Image (spheres, grey):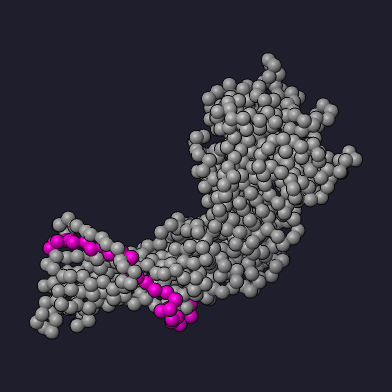
Amino acid sequence: MHWNMAKKQNPRMNFDTAATNTVQSDGLTATERFVREVISNSRDSKLDNDQPVKVTFRLIDLEGEKKQHFCEKAGLPELANAYKSIADYSDETLKKIFLGVHPDSIKKTSTPLRTLCITDSNTKGLIGPELFTPDIRNKKDLRFLGLCKSVGLNSGSNINNQSGSWGYGKSVLWANNHTRSVLFYSKLSNPWTENSTEVNERLTGFTMLPDFFLEGSDGYDGEIMFGNKKGDINVYSVWNHDAKQFAEDLNVEGFQATEPGTSQLIIGYQPSDLENNTSTETVAEQIKEAVEKFFWPAIDDNRLAVEIFINGNLVPINILENTSVQPFVRLYRKMKTSTLQPEQYSVISLDLRGGSLNDGKVLIGAKVLPEGLTGCNLINHIAKIRGNQMVIEYKESTHSTLSGSGGVGVALAGAIVPEDYGTIQDQQIQLDELLLASEPIAHHKWDEKETKIKDLRASSAIIKLNRDILHGFRDLIRNRKEEYIGEYSTLLSRLIKLGGNEGPGVRGGDVEYQTLINMNKSVAGEQCRFGHKIRYRLKPKNNWKRINGRQIPTNVRLTPRFRAIDESGQRIKIEDELKFTISEITEIDLGDDPETVSPTSKTRKGSPSETTIQTELDNNYHDIEVSWLSNLVSLDFADAARLECTYSWEKGR
């Protein structure tokens, strides 16, 4: 078994590769594009059962003797002359093809070689024949040929759950790989008989390079297959015991086939938009972020399980601890369980193509987020999802409905919409098929300009769908006004005036306050706590109405009143469940003229039992910032409650 290089059969030379020109210009990072494609390919190969597909990413840095052993067993010295011929073309070629990493680094044992092994299970494996023949061109489930021996072949079998339709996206395996070499090892769910041999396991490799010259003027094909050459042209994969032995000899954790599925070993993984000295830790974090950002629906529905390891250490996946996607997950759960209030969702119908294909439905949900929310970088975006349970895109929708706050939305289309919303399954599957046809190579949007959609004369339907989703989201946010959904509360910043013996008087001593952080929830496992913060201004004591008409007040006490209501507006008793105490107080002295004097401030921590604050008055203006923090409560309680806070100020001596 070898890397089999073949002389060109015609004088035409290709000095580029599909990997440098495919799946680009989509607004995604290289890692996002890579993760979306790899996981989607695994999910498209799912076995017909109720278990989730499992995908494991293992990043391993090889150096020293381990690197030398690996390179020799993987046959990389056989590619050395091809690498050198191409790298010598120009600095531009070195950067474009090898991502700026000179192939000579493969020989240096002191230079780490980053490998990425991606293993899936509960999948079909690389099933199907070894070679193309005219009678199989349009057959489905050609997994081996689709991944390892073709460009542009879609080998999917289930359209409405499928993520791929072009067969070009797999080029990410080589586009983010500075050696341009990938090995594949698979256990087949259905054995394939080839030349009277039953194939249960198969191993192959593919190197994607530009065409190159060796031995003087001889041109060679840059597409190099690993395997056993039979005859002058055909290269066959390695089968059964020989495949297993080769994988064991490589000694790379995860590159195995103990159950139906496929392992893909990328030799020299490097995201194409990162510097080549980017740490493996950073690379692992980017993979984790991409998994959580785009596959949280499948993970939450237990249709997908993902693990990431870096040199043997687990990098945990937790969609509820990802502050950017957490609001979307909470909203999605309510949509899937049909527990949203009527004002929180809308259903739009789409006349797909007229005639018999009509009335596909899209479910839109919206969640208003509180002021001061930190950590979510997808505020005012709506996540578009169809039956494949991957976020197709986060579409931004700017609006000015709520000052200082925003919302998130989820649009469910196709077979993923629950029947509780009046859907008919056949029509939803038709919508899934239409949306798949509208997606470009990267599957990152529903695009009316796609050729397949134009051929179906459905461009106007896609335009209307995208427009109605955006307008529906905006309308839901607008109609919610100051009422927050789910685990968040409602109290917009406002100016409050208090009078009489209960607070400041009418001589210009009114209290002004604004909300800085409004019931911001932080999650810790299956529990959470809430944080709340306000700022209020105290004017000089002589500006206050006197107590009993004679005495100048010398202090002001602030007392907060926290309460919870459910989504029907009924009050929930929280005294035994949820308690707030002051976590921090900052007093800012503005002097006697806050417009011209530089302020000074002092901060102190609150005590475990402190809930109110008393401030001494003097002849200066003061801004007081108070932060409250709740105890830990269950997520079930947080989901059921909407928190509010009111305040009273009492002057005294």
Residue 449 in view, yes or no? no
Q: Position of residue 109 (x, y in %)?
A: 58, 27
**Residue at (66, 22) in percent of width and height:** 81
**Residue at (75, 29) in percent of width and height:** 2
Residue that extends furthest to the left in the rendered view of this protein: 550
**Residue at (66, 53) in percent of width and height:** 54
Picture quadrant of residue 558: bottom left
In the image, is 431 to the left or to the right of 465? right
Picture quadrant of residue 298: bottom right
Picture quadrant of residue 336: bottom right
Magenta stretch bounds: 567-594
Nearer to us in this view, 106 or 607: 607
Q: In the picture, which quadrant includes the C terminus?
A: bottom left
Residue that extends furthest to the right in the rendered view of this protein: 196
Residue that extends furthest to the top in the rendered view of this protein: 216
Q: Is residue 383 magenta?
A: no
Nearer to us in this view, 387 or 531: 531
Residue 344 versus residue 38 in the image, above or below: below
Residue 16 versus residue 184 in the image, above or below: above
Q: Is residue 576 magenta?
A: yes
Q: In the picture, which quadrant includes the N terminus?
A: top right
Q: Position of residue 130 (x, y in %)?
A: 81, 39
Residue 115 in view, yes or no? yes
**Residue at (17, 70) in percent of width and height:** 616
In the image, is 587 to the left or to the right of 157? left
Q: Position of residue 418 (x, y in %)?
A: 64, 69
Q: Position of residue 618 (x, y in %)?
A: 13, 68
